[in-house]
């Protein structure tokens, strides 16, 4: 099972802001490892959305922002759009497991 | 542009073997670590294995140790995953993924489209 916990689902109306949490522990996020976020539209491959806690790759809109504090991280989608409907995963590294680890995933629904 | 194209997936009986391949282009393959990540139907992402740029270092997820082998041929720009003693729970889409070095924890910057492996009798 995943060592990074996310809410199964979040939803919001177009234009609203939604936030997805990613809760880890002292062997991963809390140990100083950065958090990265991926977006996966159903039926397609994941795509890098945020790297190094709060950096956006070229081409990712500024509506997406990340943060990290202590043993957790958050992804915020500001000004939600219909095309943001997808699954979102956080990712880090765990020193106890010596594994790259993913969050449980969160489905974002635009109402 | 970076392209990662997996092949070799299919239906295989429990206990048998299968080898996946991933053809890479659009970047200097021999300078980058590479991963396999899998996703069971309707489930989340699970990291499978990583190999260093020159193939000298390999690491595996716990449930894959001793059964899966990651390898690469830099002369052919190709990544491989040899899967032995396959189980029903190995049924998943397997993604070939490019590693991006990042001091406080590497990340996955490019993903292939995935190759479906179904383990069933």
Image: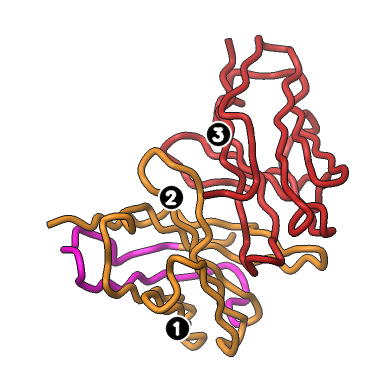
Where does label 1 land, which residue? B76
Q: CA distance from mark 2 to mark 3?
A: 13 Å
x, y percent for residue B101: 74, 69
- To which chain does the residue with label 1 belong? B
Q: Depth check: B47 or A81 in front?
A: B47
Where does label 3 land, which residue? A87
Q: Is residue B84 above or below residue B37?
A: below
Tag 1 secondary structure: loop
Q: Closer to the camera: disc 1 or disc 2? A: 2
Q: Quadrant of the C terminus of chain A?
A: top right
Q: Residue at x 75, y 63 (%)?
A: B105
Query: Any idea which chain is the red one in this picture?
Result: A
Of labels 1 and 2, earlier in sequence is 2
Label 2: few (<14), some (14–19) or many (≥20) C-alpha neighbours in 10 Å: some
Left or right, A94 with respect to A107, comes to right
The magenta segment: B5-30
Label 3: few (<14), some (14–19) or many (≥20) C-alpha neighbours in 10 Å: some
Q: Is residue B77 above or below residue B39?
A: below
Q: Closer to the camera: disc 1 or disc 3? A: 3
- In the figure, the shade used to draw chain B is orange
Residue furthest left as drawn: B121
- To which chain does the residue with label 3 belong? A
Q: Residue at x 68, y 66 (%)?
A: A96
The answer to if A19 sits in the magenta stretch is no
């Amino acid at each position: 099972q995943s060592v990074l916990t996310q809410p199964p689902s979040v939803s919001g109306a177009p234009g609203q802001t939604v936030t997805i949490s990613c809760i880890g522990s002292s062997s991963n996020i809390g140990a100083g490892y950065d958090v990265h976020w991926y977006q996966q539209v159903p039926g397609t491959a994941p795509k890098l959305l945020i790297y190094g806690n709060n950096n956006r790759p070229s081409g990712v809109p500024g509506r997406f922002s990340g943060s990290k504090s202590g043993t957790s991280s958050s992804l915020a989608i500001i000004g939600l759009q219909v095309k943001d409907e997808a699954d979102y995963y956080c990712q880090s590294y765990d020193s106890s497991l010596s594994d790259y680890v993913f969050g449980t995933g969160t489905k974002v629904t635009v109402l | 542009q970076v392209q990662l194209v997996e092949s070799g997936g299919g239906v295989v009986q429990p206990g048998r073997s299968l080898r996946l391949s991933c053809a890479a282009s659009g970047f200097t393959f021999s300078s980058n670590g590479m991963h396999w990540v899998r996703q069971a139907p309707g489930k989340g992402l699970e990291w499978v294995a990583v190999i260093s740029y020159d193939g000298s270092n390999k690491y595996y997820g716990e449930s894959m140790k001793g059964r899966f082998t990651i390898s690469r041929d830099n002369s052919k720009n190709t990544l491989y995953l040899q899967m032995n003693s396959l189980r029903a729970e190995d049924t998943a889409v397997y993604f070939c993924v490019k590693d991006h070095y990042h001091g406080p924890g590497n990340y996955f910057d490019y993903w292939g489209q995935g190759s479906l492996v179904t383990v069933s009798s």
